[in-house]
Image (cartoon, grey):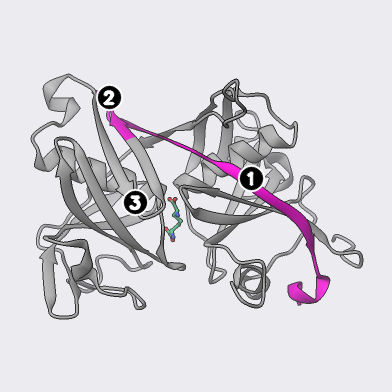
Amino acid sequence: MSDLSSGLPFLKGHGTQNDFVIVPDPDGLLDLGPAAVAAVCDRRAGVGGDGLLRVVRSAADPAAAAMADEAEWFMDYRNSDGSIAEMCGNGVRVFARYLVHAGLAKPGPLAVATRAGVRRVHVAADAADGTPGEVTVDMGTARLPGPDGIEVAVGGHRWPALNVNMGNPHAVAFVEDLAQAGNLYDAPATSPAGVYPEGVNVEFVVDRGPRHVAMRVHERGSGETRSCGTGACAVAVAAIRRDGADPAVTGEAVAYTVDLPGGRLVIEEFPDGRVAMTGPAVIVAAGTLDPALLG
Ligand SMILES: N[C@@H](CCC[C@H](N)C(=O)O)C(=O)O
């Protein structure tokens, strides 16, 4: 158990404006329950964030100890409502940026343990003018578990959707106009019932040009966010199949540009099914959390 009487150090970072509170806990001494996470992520009464990244040595956390030989650090990711998710694509890029920022890793290749398994990350060196290098993550392979006939509904609109699992669940719907998704204050309805027993992240997608799409997302546990890395991968995978460009069939790697409200990500898929995501990730602030916030 950690002594929190003098407060808890934190940092703030984002990847294409998907923003996270980063809490270093190298020795795994913190017990951050859902209420504490939600309080920290509250945009008015807390620091504010779409999620929280606890940075802990894999060997110090039972959820990651089995990955400790491969990845020194475990990304313990929580949504802003305090719920746990298996994976966060922007989160893992921001996590890697933090490790470099804190001197815990060097730019270049590094491995990060997540609940969805070890993810290989590459942090590019900063440019000569100080612009932070982009961060690429090998996101593993997408699963498309079906069934056929999934639909997403918002207001009076209803669209067919593809179930894409990137370690976490997604429903991808191609729409005519991103405004049709409305204000996205509430989670969109999905059918048939029972396809997503643990909840789902829902993506709305339009075409922008050849191999170029734009999307909005409603994230499970966080609401509408300005970017979602696993969501962008799910969208690219769905668009690649729709466009008949599946690398497992064509034998050719393919890259799609995905525009999100908070920025741009490039998603590649390779003939062996691996999906890679590249985009910016930055640290923007550091401070101390009032222990009262943590309950
Ligand atoms: N923003 C993330 C996804 C975070 C988890 C998601 N809300 C879930 O519950 O699955 C990303 O960048 O992938």
Neighbor class of circle 3 (other Cα within 10 Å; few <14, some 14-19, many 20+) is many
| Label 3, ligand 1: CB separation under 8 Å | no
The residue under label 2 is 272
C-beta proximity under 8 Å, tags 2 and 1: no
The three-letter code of the residue at mark 1 reads Ile
Viewer can see residue 199? yes
The three-letter code of the residue at mark 2 reads Asp
Identify which residue is drawn at 53% across, 43% down: 92
Q: Which mark is residue 83?
A: none
- Specify whether residue 201 is painted magenta: no
Q: Which mark is residue 260?
A: 3
C-beta proximity under 8 Å, tags 1 and 3: no
Horizontally, residue 120 falls left or right of residue 210, namely right
Neighbor class of circle 1 (other Cα within 10 Å; few <14, some 14-19, many 20+) is many
Residue in front for this viewpoint, 141 or 79? 79
Identify which residue is drawn at 53% across, 67% down: 83
Neighbor class of circle 2 (other Cα within 10 Å; few <14, some 14-19, many 20+) is few
In which quadrant will I find the C terminus?
Answer: bottom right
Viewer can see residue 10? no
Residue in front for this viewpoint, 204 or 66? 204
Mark 2 or mark 3: which is in front? 3
The residue under label 1 is 283
Q: Quadrant of ligand 1?
A: bottom left
Where disc 2 sits, the SS reads loop
> What span is colored magenta in the figure?
267-295
Q: Earlier in the sequence, mark 2 or mark 3?
A: 3
